[in-house]
Image (spheres, rainbow, N blue to C red):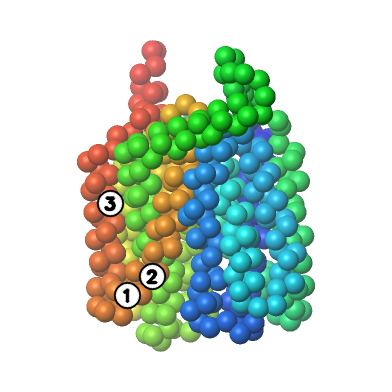
Amino acid sequence: MRNTLNPFLTLVVAGMLSRFSYQMARSPVLPRFAEDLGSSPELIGLIVAASTITGIFIKLPAGALSDILGRRRMMLLGALFFAGPPFLYPLVTGPVSLLLLRFLHGFATAIFAPVASAYVADIFQKGRGEKLGWFASANDMGATLGPLVGGFILFSTASYPVTYLVVGGLGILPLFMVLSLPPEEKKVLVPATANPGRWPQFTWRLAEFNRGVLEVVSSRAVIIASALEAAMYVGYGAFLGFFPIYAKGVGYNDAAIGLIMGAQLATTMMGKPVGGWLSDRLGRKPIILLGLGLCAVMLPLVVLAESFFALLLLSCIYGLGVATVTPSTTALVADLAKAGRMGSAMGVFGTIWDSGEAAGPILAGFLIASISYFNGFLAISGLMALAALIFALTVKDPVKPLSEQAQEKPA
């Protein structure tokens, strides 16, 4: 434990700081910056979503490359994108250059997130769900603090360049933390029968990369587990995007809405280690189904409630559902990954997850405009229920929960 705890704590702090700086750059500073540069509403939406689009395309190859080149090397590459691009924001002069910079900055989380998750999963086989839950909670903490601090700095300085220079300064810290991680054991990258030289090494690595990607994307269990997470995030994205508008429409002020949303985020953040811990002991599958069931039931109920305390309670229960699903599905995908394919599995998981997160607000917008808040959220709940049913019928836990392992030990 001692050999793995220090790298784990280092990575937890690096994850928190990276999300902290990244979200400072994104909200609420980025939409304001884009608007002041003369961007249209449609272009502002694309600028805000650009980094997620990068993640959809980059997470899979980044994870697969980490299986070949090593986790630490790929995390260093991701950390460079946290550290460098923020210093380019003061040079931006128009919407198009800002859009291109957002695509570039998106490489940071696209590379770092799946590789860091694979690193945590590598060093913890026992208690994997709990450790992934702590790592996810640390990222959530950074993502929550980032907008608060970014908005405060922009308010205090009224300067986009100063704000983004602070983002860059904070973005350098994860780079130093990743550098402090112990070097990985060197892998034999080229078979002994291969001719020495750079070209044979390159061709072997390329072939191994292709094999890793194909093995993972052909795993039905990995794809279904990842799709379940994406379905949950379709609902979560819909909730985050449209609950504030709904609450404003039924008469709540910004402070009350912020308190409800803050309570939900806090519940999710604090619940993830517990959700992962439960999945270690009771099995991934029952905890995932429980969490997704909570999300599917709570989402339409939220827009039926009108009292403040009812909204607060329902949103917190919804947050618990999210908290139990995410670390458990991440750990399940890690359990399902074949030897040497952990990074590829996390890359597939992240790509599908990002697709669901990006689709949530878009789908909710069309549904709400067409059939009302309740019916729109009910339709998305139906999607989550369908994903849960398919998952329940087709995916098995590859690892016995700790409770069963303890019972099997001889007295």
Q: What x and y, as percent, mark residue 328? A: 42, 43
| Residue 387 circle label | 3
Q: Are marks 1 and 3 in contact (CB under 8 Å)?
A: no
Q: What x and y, as percent, mark residue 190? A: 59, 22
Gap in angstroms between the C-alphas marked 2 and 1: 7 Å
Quarter containing the C terminus: top left
Inspect the image, locate mark 2, and give the three-letter code of the amino acid beneath it. Ile
Which type of secondary structure does the marked residue at label 1 adopt? helix
Which residue, given by chain and number where applicable, does mark 2 sit on? 362
Residue located at (73% from left, 57% from top) = 84
Query: Is residue 258 left or right of 11 when viewed as pictured?
Result: left
Query: Is residue 38 left or right of 269 when viewed as pictured?
Result: right
Which residue, given by chain and number where applicable, does mark 1 sit on? 366
What is the crowding at mark 3: few (fewer than 14 residues within 10 Å), some, or many (at least 20)? Answer: many
Quarter containing the N terminus: top right
Q: Do the residues labelled 2 and 1 touch (CB within 8 Å)?
A: yes
Which is nearer the N-term, disc 2 or disc 3? 2
Gap in angstroms between the C-alphas marked 2 and 3: 19 Å
Q: What x and y, as percent, mark residue 146? A: 63, 64
Inspect the image, locate mark 3, and give the three-letter code of the amino acid beneath it. Ala
